Amino acid sequence: MPRVRSPRKSLTPRVKVWLEINGSYAFGHGLCEMLQAVENAGSIKQAARDLGKSYRYVWGRIKEAEKTLGRQLVETQVGGKDAQRSCLTPEARQLAADFQAVRLRMIQRVKDEFTQLNAGPFRE
């Protein structure tokens, strides 16, 4: 019986990028998304809802990162009529922007390198 060839499946390289302090996790893509959601929503509660995560989880991850980094990332105002109760500190805004820029450059570099190698034994 002849062997049936399945259609070629393309390989896609993936890269995971994070920042460490003294070998311990400090900042990564998930946390960056949380901070950007807080900035967009104006509150941790709404950011958590937008991300489909619990308030406690998002708040805890932010507090853990602040402790690790030794810097405040989110400024909050309790109560009041203003919908914008939480915002990123200038340092957090800069860290998130820099991290995203480096992450995107690294992803593109890995794709370029993989394409240049032409996927090794799986090339068409």
Image (cartoon, rainbow, N blue to C red):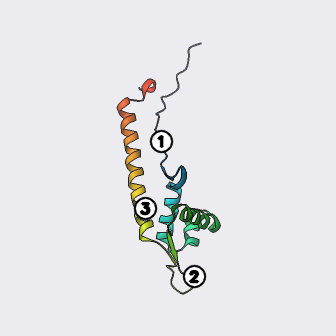
Query: Between marks 2 and 3, how big is the CA–CA gap?
Result: 25 Å
Residue wearing tag 1? 14
Numbered label attached to residue 95: 3
Vertical comparison of 66 with 42: above or below: above
Residue 51, by quadrant, is bottom right
Mark sitting earlier along the chain (2/1) = 1
Q: Dot 3, how many residues are within 10 Å of its Cα: few (below 14), some (14-19), or many (20+)?
A: some
Residue 21 position in % (x across, y down): 51, 54
Query: Between marks 1 and 3, how big is the CA–CA gap?
Result: 22 Å
Please, what secondary structure does the residue beneath circle 2 have?
Answer: loop
Q: Dot 1, how many residues are within 10 Å of its Cα: few (below 14), some (14-19), or many (20+)?
A: few
Mark sitting earlier along the chain (1/3) = 1
Residue 3, by quadrant, is top right
Three-letter amino acid code at the position of disc 1:
Arg
Q: Dot 2, how many residues are within 10 Å of its Cα: few (below 14), some (14-19), or many (20+)?
A: few
Three-letter amino acid code at the position of disc 3:
Leu
Residue 4 position in % (x across, y down): 55, 20
Vertical comparison of 39 with 3: above or below: below
Quadrant where the image shows the C terminus: top left
Pick out the residue farthest to the top: 1
The residue lying at 37 percent from left, 36 percent from top is: 113
Residue wearing tag 2? 78
